[in-house]
Image: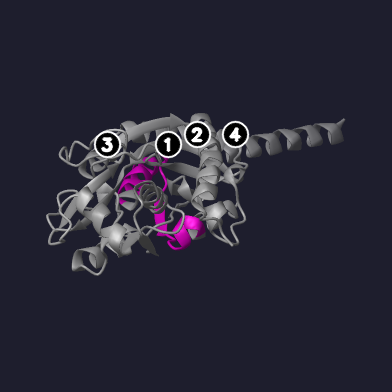
């Protein structure tokens, strides 16, 4: 009887210890991987979301910028991390939906991640230095029919890369792409005039008088630049949607951890701090819950595969 009592007591202690352990998340610092260089719009918004989550969960959230290879370095690191809630990622879905078709060696797919929530849409554009001879989109298109123009973008397989290639294909432009490690690396080169044009996010230059946008890749004109036409207005009917950005984790989070993160992410999107940064960078909140975010990314993955095949851009 005594042995049974001791064993029963031990079982209760173990059960209580397990429960307490489960309730402790997070009990230490959370790492937030942002797959692009510091200073761009995605980085700024990601940091604000991380700060809100840290405040809610009571543990620090430390940002690690793991840029390069169109975001696949950061997402690769995220996919291989332990699914315990202590390594998260924030950024566009393009390294998941686009890059596997374009970058050799990508060892993840849309089902390699848990989707926490989508936060905002990142609208991209065609832009030139303020002193560029190309004053309008029509000027740029006409010039690129006579000679090949080089353009910078945030990485192979990124939304801006595909958007320009699709636009060039539709308008018969001759272009040569030059990938950078995010807009933060590309913008100084563009402003210096060493690129014919760039494809930055509006969030990366809004209010910068050294940059003049010529085309917006969105369904409607951007409120910050109401005189700039959309690609559709210029006759490009095959649309590449804006970048869908949100919070991710490695596949296989414990249910209670995922629930805590989903709740924190939902609250973060509504917080004054995050809304202020999104507004200051010229973006729009586009919230989706985890399931919706997952389903949209899977659908986008299929669409991008067809688009990349049509444009002949697949990895050799």
Q: In percent of the image, x 25 and y 46: which residue is there?
A: 215
> Separation of disc 1 and disc 2 at Cα?
10 Å
Name the secondary structure under disc 1.
strand
- First in residue order: circle 1 vs circle 2: 1
Q: Look at the image and name its color scheme.
A: one colour
Q: Nearer the viewer, mark 3 or mark 4?
A: 3
Residue at 37% over, 57% down: 154
Contact? badges 3 and 4 (CB < 8 Å): no
CA–CA distance between discs 4 and 1? 19 Å
Q: Nearer the viewer, residue 110 or 86?
A: 110
Per the rendered image, the range of residues in magenta is: 44-72
- Label 4 crowd (10 A; few <14 / some 14-19 / many >=20): few
- Would residue 175 be seen by someone viewing this image from the given angle? yes
Q: Position of residue 301 (x, y in %)?
A: 54, 42
Q: Say which label, 4 or 2, has the lower sequence index.
A: 4
Q: Nearer the viewer, mark 3 or mark 1?
A: 3
For label 1, the crowd category at 10 Å Cα-Cα, with few meaning under 14, some 14 to 19 and many 20 or more, is many
Residue denoted by label 2 = 296
Helix, strand or loop: magenta stretch = helix
Whether residues under marks 4 and 1 lie with C-beta atoms below 8 angstroms apart, the answer is no
Q: Is residue 48 magenta?
A: yes
In terms of secondary structure, where does tag 4 sit? Answer: helix
In the picture, the disc for residue 255 is 4
Instruction: Say the numbered circle drawn on residue 233.
Output: 3
The mark closer to the camera, 3 or 2, is 3
| Residue 154 included in the magenta stretch of the image | no
> In the image, what residue occupies the spot 25% across and 54% down?
142
Quadrant (top left/top right/bottom left/bottom right) for the C terminus: bottom right
Of 237 and 239, which appears nearest the observer?
A: 237
* Residue corresponding to mark 1: 118
Quadrant of the image containing the N terminus: top right
Asked which quadrant contains residue 105, the reply is bottom right
């Amino acid at each position: 009887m005594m042995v049974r009592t001791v064993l029963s007591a031990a079982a209760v202690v173990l059960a209580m210890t397990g429960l307490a352990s489960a309730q402790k998340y997070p009990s230490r610092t959370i790492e937030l991987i942002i797959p692009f260089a510091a200073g761009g719009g995605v980085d700024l918004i990601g940091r604000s979301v991380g700060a809100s989550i840290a405040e809610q969960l009571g543990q620090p959230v430390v940002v690690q910028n793991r840029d390069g290879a169109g975001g696949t370095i950061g997402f690769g690191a995220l996919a291989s991390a332990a699914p315990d809630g202590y390594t998260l990622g924030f950024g566009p879905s393009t390294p998941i939906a686009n890059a596997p078709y374009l970058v050799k060696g990508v060892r993840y797919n849309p089902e390699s991640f848990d989707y926490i929530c989508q936060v905002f849409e990142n609208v991209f554009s065609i832009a030139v230095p303020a002193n560029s001879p190309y004053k309008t989109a029509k000027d740029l298109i006409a010039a690129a029919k006579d000679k090949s123009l080089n353009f910078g973008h945030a990485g192979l397989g990124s939304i801006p890369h595909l958007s320009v290639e699709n636009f060039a294909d539709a308008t018969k432009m001759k272009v040569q792409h030059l990938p950078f490690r995010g807009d933060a690396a590309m913008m100084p080169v563009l402003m210096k005039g060493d690129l014919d044009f760039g494809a930055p996010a509006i969030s990366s230059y809004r209010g910068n008088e050294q940059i003049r946008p010529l085309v917006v890749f969105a369904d409607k004109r951007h409120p910050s630049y109401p005189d700039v036409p959309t690609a559709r207005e210029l006759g490009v009917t095959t649309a590449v949607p804006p970048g869908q950005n949100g919070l991710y984790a490695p596949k296989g989070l414990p249910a209670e951890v995922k629930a805590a993160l989903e709740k924190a992410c939902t609250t973060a999107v509504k917080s004054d701090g995050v809304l202020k940064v999104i507004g200051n960078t010229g973006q729009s909140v586009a919230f989706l819950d985890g399931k919706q975010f997952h389903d949209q990314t899977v659908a986008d993955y299929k669409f991008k595969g067809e688009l990349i095949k049509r444009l002949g851009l697949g990895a050799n």
